[in-house]
Image (cartoon, helix red, strand yellow):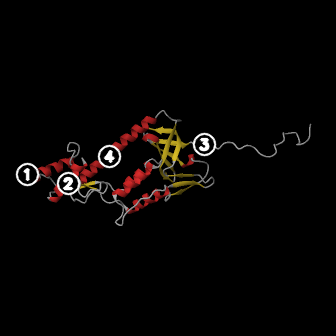
Amino acid sequence: MLAANEAVATWLSSHEVPCLFRIHDNPDPLKIEGLSAFAKSLGLTLRSGREGVRPGDIQRLLDDAEGLPAYPVVTQLALRSMKQARYCPEDSGHFGLAAPHYLHFTSPIRRYPDLVVHRALRAARHKAKPALRGDLTALGESCSKLEREAESAERELLDWKKVKFLRGREGEAFAGVVTGVARFGLFVQLDGGIAEGLCRIERLGQEWFDFDPVRHELRGSASGRVFRLGDALRVRVERVDAVLRRVDLAPIVEREPARPRTGRPKARKGTRPGRKR
């Protein structure tokens, strides 16, 4: 599928046929810097060349992080560091796929941009003028907008399904990983992608927690406990709101074993140590 998309894009670009390409601009340097800093905190390195980060550099980072508890977070940050792919008549390449020429050709039933490409290719092969209506730039912006709206609706439906799955399971414990750190608490993704919930800061303990946006962590001022992005965390489901699609969680903190008493035992009330009554 990818090879077919690249082949058609290369042919149309070389023949200067107007159509809709699928472009993916280079990532934001500031977001790449944040991804690199987080990778460094895990003992990983995001290698890059003189011209900046390349798709292969990000893929190597993901390969190195595979198997770690924080792997879902590394994947999420890598995706967030990249810009959204979009449809455009200018053939500027696809960064994520490391493809100099790319478009959507293989699914004309599902996507209108694919149908536009099919029409342009058919017309070019028959030496005819492509039957394109309107401005391609405006058409690309419209298709990109509709694509984002469809993806948003899909995410909303999936979130509702996940929350519905947890209804009636309040009090149950789950293993999870911290996928977001904010001043007001922690976002925790339950293992298996069941759902994501919020563990509010007041549930972390009766102390003040300092928020570090650079290190992505909350640190207790009295205990020194640290909750960091990518940490494994066992939580209990406290509340499920299907209307707001919200899951409230509470951390399960293992208590330290009781320390054996040392020193002289306390005397009972009404007696004095060393004297018989």
User: Between disc 2 and disc 4, whose residue precedes?
Assistant: 2
Tag 2 secondary structure:
helix
The three-letter amino acid code for the residue at tag 1 is: His
Percent position (x, y) of residue 137? 21, 57
Rendered view: 172 above or below 107: above
Residue assigned mark 1: 126
Percent position (x, y) of residue 42? 49, 55
The alpha-carbon separation of the residues under discs 1 and 4 comes to 36 Å
Q: Residues within 10 Å of mark 3 (few under 14, many from 20)?
A: few
The alpha-carbon separation of the residues under discs 3 and 4 comes to 40 Å
Verify CB contact (< 8 Å) between mark 2 and mark 4. no
Q: Residues within 10 Å of mark 2 (few under 14, many from 20)?
A: many
Is residue 76 at least partly visible in the picture?
Answer: no
The alpha-carbon separation of the residues under discs 2 and 3 comes to 57 Å
Q: Say which quadrant the C terminus sits in.
A: top right
The three-letter amino acid code for the residue at tag 2 is: Ala
Q: Which mark is residue 81?
A: none
User: Between disc 2 and disc 1, whose residue precedes?
Assistant: 2
Tag 4 secondary structure:
helix
Residue assigned mark 3: 254
**Quarter holding residue 49:** bottom left
Is residue 144 at least partly visible in the picture?
Answer: yes
Tag 1 secondary structure:
loop
Percent position (x, y) of residue 33? 42, 61
Tag 3 secondary structure:
loop
Seen as rendered, the residue at the extreme left is 127
Residue assigned mark 2: 9
The alpha-carbon separation of the residues under discs 1 and 3 comes to 72 Å
